[in-house]
Image (tube, helix red, strand yellow):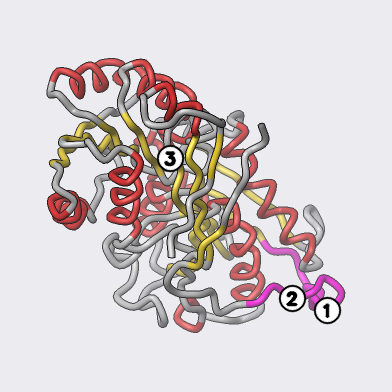
Amino acid sequence: MKARREFIVALGAGALALPFAGFAQQTAKSYRIGFLASEAASHPSQAKRLEVLKAALRELGYREGSDIVIEDRWADGRYDRLPGLASELVALKVSVIVASGTKAATAAENATTTIHIVMGSTGDPIGLGFTTNLARPSGNVTGTTNYGPELGPKLLEALKEAAPRTAKAAYLVNPADPPRTFPGMQSAAKALKFELRLVEARGPELFETAFLGMVKAHNDAVLVQGDTLFAVNVQTIAGLALKYRLASASSLNDFADAGGLITYGPDRLEGFRRAAVFVDKLLKGARPHDLPIERPTKLERVINLKTAKALGLASRGRFCCVRTG
């Protein structure tokens, strides 16, 4: 059965509107745009981000190879390469760097204080130190953030609602992208009457060990960080959660489709469509502090009822959407 989606309004709204292609001002010269990503270009979920960015730039009237040249750099999951790749883009004197993910944005921000950086998909920019103010960015970084500190607690609420007997849950994270909002999430879990503890996995070879540790520690559920490491291994992660009979939730868009119990979060690809608007305005003379950092206007919540049934949490169907507010 085809998955049904329900969209819910989140806090904050984007302030920039995408102009119609017919009204886009044509550029007078060619610009270099950097694209920095922490994973591999061969993975469909990651390659799609660059495709969406390019398509949105075309809608704005930019012609690749003529008006713009896109210099893309991929770390292929080797995060220690990101600083060097960011430095390559700086040396090429790109006009703007579009960062795909928190780790890429951090590497770009560390590499330059003068080149504009646009976040396509990133965690909390204030917590990361990119800015002190979303409405008026204080540094050279602007763009779209996936969420604020309130999304983690909301995800925990959805997990507890779907699996009310949860007493202990693990939060699976990539230590290369430490969760700065974790204290708040622990407080939220405590208010929901369950315990939340961190479990780390640096790569796919450690996933099975991490899940075995969760079971040994008597966890009932697992919350999966929305990191690119887990995005490119979403089938494996969802499969392990089901194998070890753990209720699972993540902000990754396709987590429930892959067999996880709950998806709750924004459309991450929308951030790359919006990134084109930021790039356009920056190329036309705007400064990052003129362009407020956008937060999602819609969140998506999906429960995989087939997985719920396998875990003894539901009796029929495959997918459902739950109204929240």
Is residue 98 shown above or below 60? above
Q: CA distance from mark 3 to mark 1?
A: 41 Å
Find numbered disc 2 in the image and state the secondary structure of the residue it sits on: loop
Q: Which mark is residue 23?
A: 1
- The residue closer to the viewer here, 150 or 125, is 150
Separation (CA) of disc 3 from disc 2: 35 Å
Q: Of the residues under marks 3 and 1, which one precedes in the sequence?
A: 1
How crowded pointer 1 is (Cα within 10 Å; few <14, some 14-19, many 20+) is rated as few
Front residue of 166/123: it is 166
Taking 75 as reference, is 307 above or below it?
Answer: above
**Which residue is at 66% across, 54% downward?**
53
| Quadrant of image for the C terminus | bottom left
Q: Confirm whether residue 269 shows in the render.
A: yes
Q: Nearer the viewer, residue 223 or 268?
A: 223
- Please tell me whether the stretch drawn in magenta is mainly helix, strand or loop: loop
Amino acid at the residue labelled 1: Phe
Upstream in the sequence, badge 3 or badge 2? Answer: 2
Question: Which residues are the magenta region?
Answer: 17-31
* Residue at the spot of label 2: 19
Q: Is mark 3 in CB contact (under 8 Å) with mark 1?
A: no
In the rendered image, residue 36, in percent from the top left (x then y), is placed at 51, 47
Q: Are marks 2 and 1 in contact (CB under 8 Å)?
A: yes
Q: Residues within 10 Å of mark 3 (few under 14, many from 20)?
A: many
Whether residue 25 sits left or right of residue 242 in the image: it is: right
